[in-house]
Amino acid sequence: MGTTTTSDGATISYDTIGEGRPLVLVHGITESRSSWGSLPESFADHGYRVTSLDLRGHGASSRTAPYDLATMAGDLGAVLADLAAPDALLVGHSLGGAVVSAYAAGGPCRAVVNVDQPLQLAGFQSALQQLEPLLRGTDDEFQQAIGMVFAQMAGPLAGAERDRIDGLRRGEQDVVLGVWEAVLSSSADDLNALVDGLVGQVTVPYLSLHGIDPGAEYGEWLTGKVSSATFEVWPDLGHYPHLIEPAKFVNRITLFDTEAR
């Protein structure tokens, strides 16, 4: 296990296995690097040096505010510097997809894979604002809201794997609100301008892979903003397509990486 300390004193923990081309996995909100299950080993078997990290406020990393997207992207940059891996393939799920996208807008990497995190946030903002009273309420109310969010997105993830992910989830109110503050508090116009500015700066090969179909109009929007983007839907797999079809996921990412070189 490795640890790096950021410029504001946060400690970011990570694991690295395997030998070969660098690949970094970034998990979703309320989860941790353990959420990837056996995927790090599978990628290592395909010739990658795989690093999975815990975002600040998650897992074994320190609970150090702030928790905004730009700060987390900077933390990812600190880990990449620690690894001496400026050419890494970045794979992010959910919040991790937003983090790797934000990093790629200004930092060096080989390519980006965003798993089930639409970057056009207006629809998410509307849904999230409906839950805002619960999110800002008591701990019981907050946990109820988090449970509602993930129950709606789980899709066909079931059995032992669903239990594993649910058991790993740690919803810390200050962390979650810190991550979602910009979405909750920004005007729709300001949020759209923020997103447009972000995605417009991504130039590396970019795979946007979804288990929940965000609609054809999203794919058109994304590929219009990011000329290097590929938009792909694995229908009806919910928020965790990589866990439901792990072998297919590893093969798809490996092929994408080969084509991107």
Image (cartoon, grey):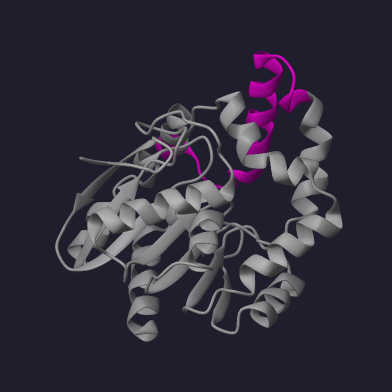
Residue 130 horizontal side relative to residue 30, left or right: right
Q: Which residues are magenta?
A: 134-161
Tell me: residue 57, above or below residue 192. Answer: above
Residue 126 horizontal side relative to residue 243, left or right: right
Viewer-nearest residue: 89 or 240: 89
What is the residue that sits farthest to the left in this orientation? 19
Q: Is residue 214 visible?
A: no
Residue at (34, 31) in percent of width and height:
60
Q: Position of residue 249 (x, y in %)?
A: 40, 64
Residue 143: in magenta span = yes
Residue 125 horizontal side relative to residue 24, left or right: right
The image quadrant of residue 142 is top right
Tell me: residue 253, above or below residue 68. Answer: below
Quadrant for the C terminus in the image: bottom left
How many numbered marks, from 0 up? 0
Viewer-nearest residue: 241 or 203: 203
The image quadrant of residue 174 is top right
Task: Give the prevailing secondary structure in the magenta stretch.
Answer: helix
Q: Position of residue 57 (x, y in %)?
A: 47, 32
Q: Is residue 188 visible?
A: yes
Tell me: residue 144, above or below residue 161. Answer: above
Viewer-nearest residue: 208 or 192: 192
Q: Position of residue 128 (x, y in %)?
A: 76, 40
Residue at (50, 67) in percent of width and height:
106
Residue 152: in magenta span = yes
